[in-house]
Each structure stands twice: as structure tokens, then as C-alpha cells.
Image (cartoon, rainbow, N blue to C red):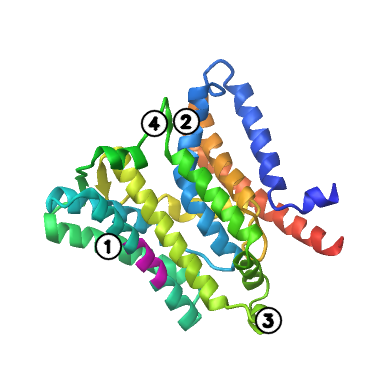
Amino acid sequence: MKNLLRRPEFGAFAAFALTYVFFAFVTHGAGFVSINGAAGWLNLAAELGIVAIPVGLLMIAGEFDLSIGSTVGAASMVVAIGTKFYGYPIWPMIGLALVLGAAIGLTNGLVVVKTNLPSFIVTLATNFIVIGATMGISRLIANITSSSIVTTDSARMVFAARWGQANISILWWVIAALLGAWVLGRTAFGNWIFATGGNLQAARGAGVPVERVKISLFVATGIAAAFVGILQGVQWNSGNATYGQGYVFQAPIVAVIGGVLLGGGYGSVTGIFLGTALFGVISTGIFYTGWNTDWIQLFLGGLLAAAVLANNYVRRFALTSR
């Protein structure tokens, strides 16, 4: 039991199971537990989860990235303007959008490690800069802040395929989770992430390339956010500068609910995955109850407060019971 309690994902799993059972009971007969109902909350969780996994890894390393929201919108607009306004093929524009995401992440990482400014402030500023630049440049070029996308069958197959009500984003979410779990649990880089977030000076003294770890993770969050922007753009057949703004705080919230400590050095990809799934269950479950969707914020706020308290307790328990 002690070993189970030490697991970062234990609280997220318990919360997910209880919440799912609660909504299954409250919405009995409304279709929440049907295949389509499951597809609904999985679709909602998947796009957030693709971003939340690298954001959670970055938090384990002791840093934040709040620029992901604007990166999602910027990536979708790159594809939209490139294909609709200039008539370029979609795949080069997809590549350009991913490069843009990597560049935003690289800039964040370099500024944080070179200036030692808090990443919370740096990336929050970047979020405003990127969305402002996206809207301003879009207005300057095409006098728009949203546009349709000229897509192809191959792009739709990769980014917008569907099986019944389930989107291909679910598959990409699972791939991202498996890759993140492998990196964190099976590689030296994963050990460096824990060391960087656990004790920065000790990690540096032990030879861990902490600057490279942080910059690499910032680049990963930027690429993931751009990927989601492309995913949404192709799926909805449009780009919009405001896409992704909800992820700015949702991604850190589900990471914390999943067992990641705000101070860094502790967490798991499984926990982040479950925290994101819990977000999907709550958002979709409330829809099936017929309640006002404003209650979603109450549920998430309560879970976040409980998760922070529980994570601190479990962390102290794990340290004192060794």
C-alpha cells in the first residue's frame, strides 16, 4: 500500500474512477457510458493531452510554458494563410508551422536559461506577443484573423481521420503518452528531467546538462502545441489566431491533477494522461447531465486544490517512509 501511495498517478486514478462512476450514475440512460459517449470525452481530452504531456515533463523539470495557447493559434494560421491566401501546398505549410512551434519553444528556453527569469513570466509574455503578432500579421497580409484551409486527402487522413465518433487525435494522444513515458522512465534524459526539477544545483554539480534539458523540453512543448494547431485546423478546415487559448492554464492544471508537483522533481506521464482523461470526463459528463457548463470550472478548481494538497502529502509521505 505504501508503494502504491508513492506513485504520482495514484490520486489521479482514484479521482478518475470516482468521477467516471459518479457521472455514469447521474447520467444513467443518457448515453455517457456508450461508445459514442466515450468517444466524446476521449476526443476532448486527446487534443489537450498532446500538449499537456510535454508541458507536464517541463513542469517536472521545474519550469512552465504558458505560450502554448498562442502557438496553437499561430500554427493554424500559418497553414490557413499559406494554403488559402498564397495557394501553397498544405504539407510544406504544415512543416513551416512545426518549425514555428519549435522556434517559439527555443526562444522561450534560451531566454529562461540565459536570464534566469521565471519561466511563468517569460512564457506568459510570449503568449501575448505571439497571439498579438499572429493577429497583426494576419490583418496586414490578408485582413483576417481566421481563414479556411485548403487541405488534401492525405492531410485529412493524418490529422482528421475518424472512426465513428472517435477522432484520430486519440491515437496521437496515446502515441505522445507512450513516447513521453519511455523518455521519462527508460532514458538518461528522463533521469536528467527529474534531477533538474528536484535540485537544480545538485544536478548541475553532478554533470547534468540542465540548460540543454530545459531548452529541449521548451522546444518539445512548442512543437506539440503547433501540432495541435495543425490538427484542429485540418479537422475544422479553418485556422484561427485564438485557437488554443484555453490550454494556457488547462495543461498545467491537468498535469498537477495527474500528480506533478508545482515545484518540480516529481510526477509521471501516466498521471498526466489520467489527469487529462479526468478533464474530458468532467467536461463531457456535465454536458450529459444537462447542467450548466459553468459547473466545469467548479469541478476543475476543486480537483486542482485537492490535487495540490494530496500531492504535497504524498510527497512528504514518500520521503519520510523510505
Report the amino acid beneath label 3: Ala
Which residue occupies the extreme right position in the image? 321
Report the amino acid beneath label 1: Gly
Residue picked out by circle 2: 40
Q: Distance between the residues labelled 3 and 4?
A: 48 Å
Mark on residue 162?
4
In percent of the image, x 70 and y 46: which residue is there? 11
Residue picked out by circle 3: 206
Task: Say few, some or many: other residues with alpha carbon within 10 Å of mark 1 (under 14 / 14 to 19 / 20 or more).
Answer: some
Bounds of the magenta segment? 100-106
Q: Distance between the residues labelled 2 and 1?
A: 32 Å
Q: Distance between the residues labelled 3 and 2?
A: 46 Å
Report the amino acid beneath label 4: Arg
Q: Main secondary structure of the magenta part?
A: helix
Q: Mark 3 and mark 1 in contact (Cβ < 8 Å)?
A: no
Report the amino acid beneath label 2: Gly
Mark on residue 132?
1
In percent of the image, x 66 and y 71: which residue is there? 195
Q: In this view, does 37 lie to the left or right of 190?
A: left
Residue 103 belongs to the span the image colors magenta: yes
Task: Say few, some or many: other residues with alpha carbon within 10 Å of mark 4 (under 14 / 14 to 19 / 20 or more).
Answer: some
Q: Mark 1 and mark 4 in contact (Cβ < 8 Å)?
A: no
In percent of the image, x 39 and y 73: which residue is there? 107
In percent of the image, x 43 and y 40: which residue is there? 169
Q: Distance between the residues labelled 4 and 2?
A: 12 Å
Residue 25, image quadrant: top right
